[in-house]
Structure formats: structure tokens, C-alpha cells
């Protein structure tokens, strides 16, 4: 896929109100498809279609939420942190900045005790 076609596809995705709502919601905290359907007022099939498109271009990531009961489920977190488009002397310049969301509280901590403390506080 060329850079120009990828830009076109990302612009198409970002022009969709449902996709933007999902990105906005998952930029706050990871959410399940059911949570997204409720929060964004859309059907679960619509959520899954948009999530699939957003994942295809690395704008959202899937994580597994582990439950003590064994009923694990998927949550989605936005990885898009910035998108810019600039018109400069007859051509477009676009950039997409992605981040890696924390899979669990304290993931970014270097010290094991600090990591454990943050994980414990968020149980």
C-alpha cells in the first residue's frame, strides 16, 4: 500500500463520526465493545466494523481484560495521539502519531515495587 493510499484510507476512517466517537472514548480508557456501544450510542456490529477498520491502520489496539472468574474479554484502546494534514506549495503533507497505551496500571514503572503498588491500587 502506498503512503498516498494509506492517507486516503485514514482520512476516510476519520471522516466517519462513529469511528471518531470510538477513538475519543478509547482515548480516555480501554473499553469493551459493549461499553462502546452504550457510550457511543451505536450497535455492537457497528462498533466491531469500525474497530476492525481502526485496527487495520494501527489507530486502535485490542487488549485482553483478565477477570478472576475466568471470563476474560477484549477491550480497545486508542493508539492515535495526533493526526495532522498540511497543504504546502501544491502538495499535502500528512503525519500520524501513534502511542502504545498501557496494558495495565504501572506498566511504565521501572521499579518492581512501584509497579506492584500501582497495580494493587487499581484493583
Image (cartoon, grey):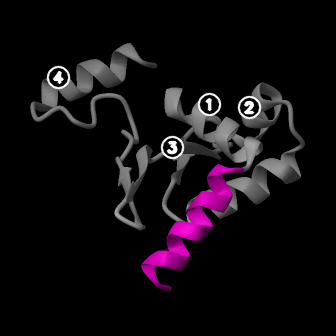
Q: Quickly name the residue at label 3.
A: 78
Q: Which residue is drawn at 87% across and 53% down?
A: 45
In the rendered structure, the answer to whether residue 40 lies left or right of residue 69 reads right
The residue labelled by disc 1 is: 25
Q: What residue does disc 4 label?
A: 114
For marks 1 and 3, the one nearer the N-term is 1
Separation of residues labelled 1 and 3 (CA atoms): 8 Å
Residue 92 appears at what percent x and percent y?
Answer: 42, 64
Give whichever of discs 4 and 3 has the lower sequence position: 3
- In the foreground, 39 or 32: 39
Q: Can residue 68 be seen in this view?
A: no
Relative image position of residue 78 (x, y in whole percent): 51, 43
Q: Distance between the residues labelled 3 and 2?
A: 14 Å
Q: Quadrant of residue 101 in the image?
A: top left
Q: Which of marks 4 and 2 is nearer the N terminus?
A: 2
Placement of 15 over or under 10, stated as above or below: above
Sort mark 4 into few (<14), some (14-19) or many (20+) by Cα contacts within 10 Å. Answer: some
Whether residue 102 sits left or right of residue 36 in the image: it is left
Which residue is nearer to you in this view: 33 or 114? Answer: 33
Helix, strand or loop for disc 4: helix
Q: Name the residue under label 2.
A: 35
| On screen, residue 1 above or below 83 | below
Amino acid at each position: 500500500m502506498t503512503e498516498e493510499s494509506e492517507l486516503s484510507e485514514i482520512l476516510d476512517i476519520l471522516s466517519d463520526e462513529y469511528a471518531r466517537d470510538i477513538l475519543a472514548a478509547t482515548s480516555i480508557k480501554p473499553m469493551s465493545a459493549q461499553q462502546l456501544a452504550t457510550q457511543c450510542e451505536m450497535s455492537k456490529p457497528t462498533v466491531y466494523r469500525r474497530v476492525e477498520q481502526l485496527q487495520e491502520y494501527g489507530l486502535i489496539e485490542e487488549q485482553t481484560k483478565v477477570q478472576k472468574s475466568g471470563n476474560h474479554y477484549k477491550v480497545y484502546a486508542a493508539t492515535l495521539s495526533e493526526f495532522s494534514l498540511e497543504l504546502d506549495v501544491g502538495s499535502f503533507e500528512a503525519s500520524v502519531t501513534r502511542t502504545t497505551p498501557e496494558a495495565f496500571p504501572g506498566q511504565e514503572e521501572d521499579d518492581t515495587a512501584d509497579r506492584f503498588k500501582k497495580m494493587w491500587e487499581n484493583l
